[in-house]
Structure formats: structure tokens, C-alpha cells
Image (spheres, grey):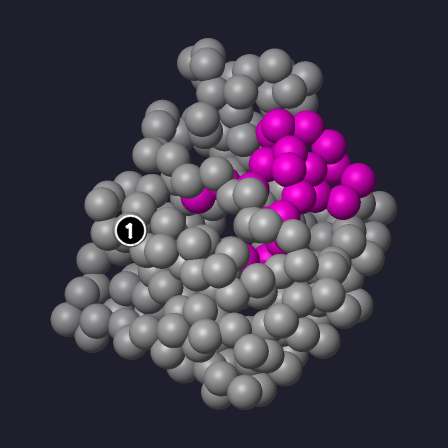
């Protein structure tokens, strides 16, 4: 578990550094307190799935790969109108798909609540159909839930974040049932680790990842 005060302080620091960030009230957020201190169930060791859209899936994959308890992350597409879309098709913004990450996690090591906390911090959930310079419905903020409990938690926390005015602007994250997941092309998988000298990785993914690592330093996988 994170030390709450440290985590929230680092969240505030990371958001202040972000080019697209707004002034937020993380240090006073009871909702982040609740998410961050929800215990994992030690008896539950079967992998479960969380699906998040938070802008470019290269960023999301790189961030969630860092967390202890996350066993695998796959980049792909969800929420659209056609079957087996290609990256080129999704990039037109006409298929209805969002770029998402399927996160396979061990609930005995990390809870869905903690993943939600990471999701809200990993991007700006107040931006509609964009993240920074990435613009289009494919970059929308989205939570695709896999069961009623995930739906309840996502809706509850979104409501509380807005009631507490944790963000200056309202959270616009879409909350919808999980649909068919179409795994992205092979070259999108593990993209940052395989292409960290690529300009987008250097100037967009790396800064986001470094801030994410500072916030969640107590939940990172052993780097030895």
C-alpha cells in the first residue's frame, strides 16, 4: 500500500508538472484516500482483467506494466462499430473504437481500486476525446467494466471525484460494459520498451512514465 500523504503529495507534484494538467485538489481528496487504502484480497489469486482507455495506448501500457501485481498488459481497441479494426482505421476516428489497454492483474497483489487510482492519475480525465496533442474519439478517457463490481466502483469514484471537485473541470470518463477486445498489431505491443528512443516515446511517453513512477514508487515491481 502507498503511504497516503506521500502519494497524494507526489500526485500533486506530478500534475503540476504536466503540460496539460489543471490545478487539482488531490491533497484534500477523500476519494483517492479510499481508493489507495482498499486492501487486496489475499485469497484471490486468479488473474482478473481491467480495461482502460487513457489516451495513446503506448503510454497506458508503459505505465501499468510498472505496477506490482500486473502480470500482463495488451494494447488494443474496444468500443467500436466494426470487427477486427486496424490501427489505420481506428486513427480515422470513424470506427468508434478507443485505444485501450487490457490489464491482467493478480487481485492478491493489487486491487481494482488501486488500478482505478492509477488510471485517474495516468491521464487527464477531464479532457473530452483527447489527451494533450492526441485528438480524436479514439483517445477518449474510458473505463470498460467486466462485472457489476467494477461498474459500481468506477461510477462511485467518478461521482465522488466530481462532488469533491478534485479536478478543476468535471471528469468526463466514459464508463461502459466491456465489448469485444481486438488486440492491436504486434508492433504496438510492449511499444515503449522496444522503441524508447523513438521521438514520441522520448517526448510524450517517457515524461508521463517518470511522473507515474514517482507517484506509485511503493507499488512498482522490483527492478533488481
Residue drawn 74% across the image and 58% down it: 21
Percent coordinates x, y for residue 89 in the rendering: 62, 15
Q: How many marks?
A: 1
In the picture, residue 210 is in which quadrant? bottom right
- Residue 217 in view: no
Q: Quadrant of residue 83?
A: top left
Instruction: Name the residue: 69% across, 37% down.
Output: 130
| Residue at 29 percent of width and 51 percent of height | 152
Between residue 71 and residue 50, name the one nearer to us. 50
Q: Is residue 200 left or right of residue 149?
A: right
Residue assigned mark 1: 152
Q: Give the image location of residue 12, x and y in percent.
A: 67, 74
**Looking at the figure, which quarter contains the N terminus?**
bottom left
Decide if residue 45 is in sight here: yes
Q: In the picture, which quadrant includes the C terminus?
A: bottom right
Magenta residues (range): 120-143
Quarter holding residue 177:
top left
Say whether residue 159 is magenta: no
Q: Is residue 24 left or right of residue 72?
A: right
Secondary structure at badge 1 equals: helix
Residue 62 shown left or right of residue 153 in the figure? right
Q: Residues within 10 Å of mark 1 (few under 14, many from 20)?
A: few
Is residue 139 located in the magenta-colored stretch of the structure?
yes
**Residue at left offset 76%, top offset 69%:** 16
Q: What percent of the width, then of the height, locates residue 57? A: 59, 42
- Horizontally, residue 220 falls left or right of residue 46, namely right
Q: Tell me: residue 224, above or below residue 44.
A: below
Q: Residue 91: where, in percent of width, then height?
A: 67, 22
Q: Nearer the viewer, residue 74 or 153?
A: 153
Amino acid at each position: 500500500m502507498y503511504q497516503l500523504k506521500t502519494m497524494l503529495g507526489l500526485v500533486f507534484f506530478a500534475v503540476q508538472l504536466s503540460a496539460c494538467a489543471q490545478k487539482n485538489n488531490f491533497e484534500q481528496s477523500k476519494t483517492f484516500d479510499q481508493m489507495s487504502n482498499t486492501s487486496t484480497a489475499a485469497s484471490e489469486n486468479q488473474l482478473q482483467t481491467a480495461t482502460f482507455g487513457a489516451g495513446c495506448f503506448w503510454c497506458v501500457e508503459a505505465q501499468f506494466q510498472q505496477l506490482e501485481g500486473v502480470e500482463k498488459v495488451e494494447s488494443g481497441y474496444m468500443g467500436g462499430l466494426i470487427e477486427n479494426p486496424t490501427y489505420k482505421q481506428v486513427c480515422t476516428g470513424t470506427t468508434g473504437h478507443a485505444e485501450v489497454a487490457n490489464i491482467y492483474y493478480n487481485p492478491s497483489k493489487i486491487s481494482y481500486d488501486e488500478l482505478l487510482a492509477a488510471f485517474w492519475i495516468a491521464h487527464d480525465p477531464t479532457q473530452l476525446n483527447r489527451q494533450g496533442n492526441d485528438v480524436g474519439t479514439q483517445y477518449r478517457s474510458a473505463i470498460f467494466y467486466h462485472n457489476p463490481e467494477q461498474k459500481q466502483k468506477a461510477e462511485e469514484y467518478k461521482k465522488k471525484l466530481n462532488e469533491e471537485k478534485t479536478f478543476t473541470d468535471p471528469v468526463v470518463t466514459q464508463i461502459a460494459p466491456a465489448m469485444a477486445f481486438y488486440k492491436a498489431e504486434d508492433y504496438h505491443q510492449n511499444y515503449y520498451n522496444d522503441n524508447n528512443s523513438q521521438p514520441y516515446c522520448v517526448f510524450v511517453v517517457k515524461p508521463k512514465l517518470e511522473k507515474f513512477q514517482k507517484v506509485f514508487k511503493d507499488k512498482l515491481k522490483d527492478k533488481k
